[in-house]
Image (cartoon, rainbow, N blue to C red):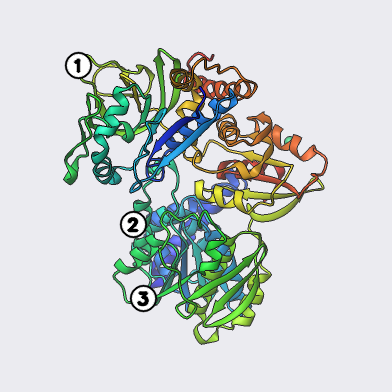
């Protein structure tokens, strides 16, 4: 790796010049452009930098739970005294990631951090995976995703397999997901297989399952991996190497406990004998929720919980984990949902009533809610108007103001409310 | 009607990739809103066939990979299904759920062409490309608006009646501008997902055949059908078609 400075210094300098130029043209914009330029002139840059982390390189991927798992894992590793390079999830991973690396890299092509933890969308992750050499790969689950992918969860599994294939030390999978179990069997590598999951009791308390495309028939025993043995609201119990630990979750919902189990398993793999379960569980319990995944934000003096819906399964999980009887729920479905048909199997009836429906697909989702017996207040396609009216309502009688939105509506909501 | 209306949805765990099976729930809600009692029977693979003939049958879409096993599962019940159709039980069949009722399905590749149940005329043939877009159809039930997502065309048998004429989209594809099929009591269509919720005129046509003096005009249907019209108009406006 001594060749790195000679090979990449010109590309790094070029990328930085482009970044300056892009920022001059559009403030805060053009963040992917420097990455594009560097990837053109030095295609090996990305892999070379990522292979240079002495303490390991972790990829987190899967249909959902990536952001929360990544945030938890980074917190645990930092609590153990490790310096971490991590990325915000970007639309175009190769360009966005290269740009993020450019921000931090020195002219020798190195980043001053011991470990890299990167969250990757399965599609883009699979594209760049062949050139990467992660030590640890953590896969969360396979859920039926966007309609324009033709519901082909087999395709998603194939993409995750391409990422899994690259793990050199450990491949960590959610053992309650049958598709992940199968792909792990097929993976041709010497990486050790590490599993995490929930107990039979926890699964029984989720009668609709955990949202995976196919659920594994058997539960993991506590001596075979990290197992969530109890979930009660924001409190859970996890068994690590045979010992039970209490943990607090960033928000209600078994899926957050599962994210925690994945993060703990990955941390134990990365840290080896340095892993301290007491420190890890205490750190994890203090992790704040990610925006749109249970985070409560105060806007214009009003507390709001934002809930991101990424696919029908996460819609169902979120509806099921919300407090019953909320009287101020706003649902926003935007243009990212090209065909709203795939939301129809969701049982949205537990919502009971929704005070406002908005987004470019407002009428479509209002129709779904209506046939599920959900009472609907106003239908206002313009998101900004609906948000302003929703915020202006007096405090709710039950719970807090709750906004359920799809990714596109989340972006617009953040922009309109000035949440960054 | 004194006894409850039965809406049978075929294999809803597998035939619901676009939420098509939920059309059974739409029929049930509309019937309930007009004061009728309804049972939705979810017939799952491997379960015994419902003993009594249902009032209405809904068959939704499944994935191509699941088609051969779905057809094998249904084949022993072919005569029963044929009997229901012959006695006039309305059947709404959507996407691949319609294709399995035809003569054959050209899956392409190693899978080749598979024989289907042959309960209606016509067959599904491979198209040059997948279509995944809005579909607007002019029909006897008014202008129907929805979404189509399929990689095959439907070859109508000579003399067959389509559900309507394509205003926007591909529909049955290949030559001509037809969409769907009406044969006896069977309606087949590429309009997937909540076609009956979005186009209540079609839902009320089905219910009108099985409930005597069915009256769709209720307080709930009034409100919900206004939402459906608005949803259709959003699509029509985007496609530069006249709104209702
Ligand atoms: Zn405003």
In this rendering, the label closer to the viewer, 3 or 1: 1
Disc number for residue A191? 3
- Residue nearest the viewer, comparing A124 with A94: A124
- State left or right for residue A77 relative to residue B132: right
- Seen as rendered, the residue at the extreme front is B2
Residue A180, picture quadrant: bottom left
Q: Is residue A340 left or right of residue A402?
A: left
Residue A168 at what x, y percent from top left? 37, 75
Q: Residue furthest bottom?
A: A273
| Some atom of ligand 1 lies within 8 Å of the CB belonging to the residue at label 2 | no
**Number of marks present in the image shown:** 3
Would you identify the image quadrant in which residue B169 lies?
top left
| Residue at 47% from the left image edge and 40% from the top image edge | A342
Foreground pick, B220 / A191? B220
Q: Earlier in the sequence, mark 3 or mark 2?
A: 2
Question: Helix or strand or loop: what does disc 2 sit on?
Answer: helix
Q: CA distance from mark 3 to mark 2?
A: 18 Å
Where is residue A223 shown, x and y percent of the image?
Answer: 47, 81
Q: Are marks 3 and 1 on the same chain?
A: no
Q: CA distance from mark 3 to mark 1?
A: 60 Å
Residue A154: horizontal and vertical position, in percent? 34, 53
Give the quarter of the image for residue A88: bottom right
The numbered dot on residue B158 is 1
Neighbour tally class for label 2: few under 14, some 14-19, many 20 plus, Cα within 10 Å: some
Q: Which of the chains bears the disc numbered 1?
A: B
């Amino acid at each position: 790796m001594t060749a790195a400075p000679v090979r990449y210094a010109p590309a790094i300098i070029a990328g930085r010049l482009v970044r300056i130029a892009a920022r001059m043209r559009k403030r805060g914009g053009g963040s992917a452009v420097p990455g594009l330029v560097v990837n053109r002139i030095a295609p090996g840059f990305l892999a070379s930098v990522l292979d240079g982390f002495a303490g390991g390189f972790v990829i987190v991927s899967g249909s959902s739970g990536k952001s929360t798992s990544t945030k938890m894992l980074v917190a645990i590793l930092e609590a153990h005294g490790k310096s971490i390079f991590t990325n915000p999830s970007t639309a175009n991973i190769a360009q966005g990631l290269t740009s993020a690396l450019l921000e931090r890299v020195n002219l020798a092509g190195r980043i001053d951090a011991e470990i890299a933890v990167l969250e990757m969308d399965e599609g883009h992750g699979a594209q760049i995976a062949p050139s990467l050499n992660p030590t640890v790969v953590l896969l969360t689950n396979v859920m039926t995703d966007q309609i324009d992918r033709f519901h082909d969860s087999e395709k998603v599994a194939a993409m995750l397999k391409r990422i899994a294939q690259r793990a050199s030390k450990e491949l960590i999978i959610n053992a309650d997901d049958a598709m992940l179990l199968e792909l792990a069997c097929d993976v041709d590598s010497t990486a050790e297989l590490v599993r995490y999951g929930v107990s039979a009791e926890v699964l029984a308390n989720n009668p609709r399952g955990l949202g995976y495309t196919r659920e594994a028939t058997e539960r993991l025993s506590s001596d075979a991996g990290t197992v969530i043995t109890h979930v009660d609201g924001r409190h859970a119990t996890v068994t690590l190497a045979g010992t039970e630990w209490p943990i607090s979750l960033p928000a209600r919902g078994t899926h957050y406990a599962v994210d925690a189990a994945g993060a703990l398993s990955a941390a134990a793999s990365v840290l080896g004998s340095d892993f301290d379960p007491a420190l890890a569980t205490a750190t994890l319990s203090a992790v704040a929720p990610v925006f749109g995944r249970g985070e409560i934000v105060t806007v214009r003096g009003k507390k709001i919980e934002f809930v991101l819906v990424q696919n029908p399964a996460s819609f169902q999980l979120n509806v099921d984990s919300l407090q019953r009887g909320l009287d101020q729920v706003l649902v926003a479905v935007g243009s990212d949902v090209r065909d709203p048909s795939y939301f129809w199997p969701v049982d949205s009836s537990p919502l009971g009533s929704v005070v406002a429906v908005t987004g470019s697909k407002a009428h479509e989702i209002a129709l779904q809610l209506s046939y599920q017996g959900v009472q609907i207040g106003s239908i206002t396609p313009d998101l900004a108007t609906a948000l302003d009216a929703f915020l202006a309502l007096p405090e709710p009688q039950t719970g807090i103001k709750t906004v359920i939105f799809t990714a596109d509506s989340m972006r617009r909501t953040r922009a309109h409310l000035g949440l960054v | 009607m004194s006894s409850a209306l039965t809406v049978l949805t075929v294999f809803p765990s597998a035939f619901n990739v676009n939420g098509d099976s939920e059309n059974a729930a739409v029929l049930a809600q509309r019937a309930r809103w007009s004061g009728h009692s309804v049972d939705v029977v979810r017939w799952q693979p491997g379960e015994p066939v419902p003993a009594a003939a249902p009032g209405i049958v809904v068959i939704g879409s499944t994935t191509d990979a699941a088609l051969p096993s779905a057809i094998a599962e249904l084949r022993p019940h072919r005569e029963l299904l044929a009997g229901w159709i012959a006695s006039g039980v309305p059947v709404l069949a959507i996407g691949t759920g319609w294709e399995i009722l035809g003569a054959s399905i050209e899956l392409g590749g190693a899978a080749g062409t598979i024989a289907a149940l042959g309960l209606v005329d016509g067959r599904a043939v491979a198209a040059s490309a997948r279509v995944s877009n809005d579909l607007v159809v002019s029909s006897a039930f008014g202008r129907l608006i929805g979404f189509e997502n399929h990689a095959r065309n439907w070859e109508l048998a000579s003399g067959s009646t389509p559900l309507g004429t394509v205003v926007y989209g591909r529909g049955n594809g290949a030559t001509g501008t037809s969409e769907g099929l009406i044969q006896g009591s069977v309606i087949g269509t590429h309009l997937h997902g909540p076609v009956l919720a979005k186009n209540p005129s079609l839902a009320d046509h089905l219910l009108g055949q099985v409930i005597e003096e069915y009256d769709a005009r209720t307080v709930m249907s009034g409100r919900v059908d206004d939402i459906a019209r608005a949803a259709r108009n959003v699509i029509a406006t985007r496609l530069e078609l006249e709104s209702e």
